[in-house]
Image (tube, rainbow, N blue to C red):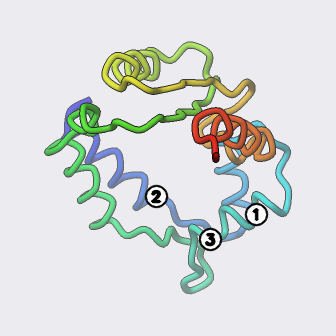
Amino acid sequence: MTKEKALLGWKEYIESSKYSSWDEVVKEYQDYTTKQWDTSLDSIINSNFKKVKGNYILKADLFSILATIKAFYKEPCSTTYDNILCPVLLLHATIPIIDSSRDRGLQQIKKNINKIEVKGIENTKHNVNWDIPNSVANEILLWKQENYKVY
């Protein structure tokens, strides 16, 4: 994806993220999770919004989001891989099942970070911690016990 396309896409997303009711927000963000919507997801999502003149709008402002995207193109994350010397756990979504960009990214990360464990968390979408928070927490605790033993 080109920098220009990414910037335009994010600009359109931020500018269109204005909802007149909480139900509209839930309807939009339900697509980001495999979990049945509940009060815990309400709390998570609610922290990303502010209510202005009766509408729900994202707290993240356009300038900050676009500055972050520009930074990724100026200094890609991949330039830091050689400096990561500690053990790393990377948990990723498995839906959609076929995602060539995710697969390419995982291969690049595995190739460049020596001490990495990559796990796909079954039946999860964009935010794995939304879908099955207890399983994610358990994976992290098990990984921590295996990689950071206290003597």
In percent of width and height, residue 88 lies at: 48, 35
* Mark 1, residue position: 42
* Mark 2, residue position: 16
Choose top left, top right, bottom left or bottom right for residue 121.
top right
**Considering only vertical position in the picture, is 22 above or below 116?**
below
Q: Which residue is drawn at 34% across and 16% down?
A: 111
Identify the amino acid type marked 1: Asp
* Mark 3, residue position: 47
**Considering only vertical position in the picture, is 122 above or below 27?**
above
Q: Which of 128 and 10 is in front in this view?
A: 128
Q: Give the tally of numbered discs.
A: 3
In percent of width and height, residue 135 lies at: 78, 38
**For this view, does 47 lie left or right of residue 114?**
right
Q: Which of marks 3 and 1 is nearer the N terminus?
A: 1
In what element is the residue under mark 2? helix
Identify the amino acid type marked 2: Ser
In percent of width and height, residue 60 lies at: 43, 68
In what element is the residue under mark 3? loop
The quadrant the N terminus occupies is top left
**Considering only vertical position in the picture, is 139 above or below 14?**
above
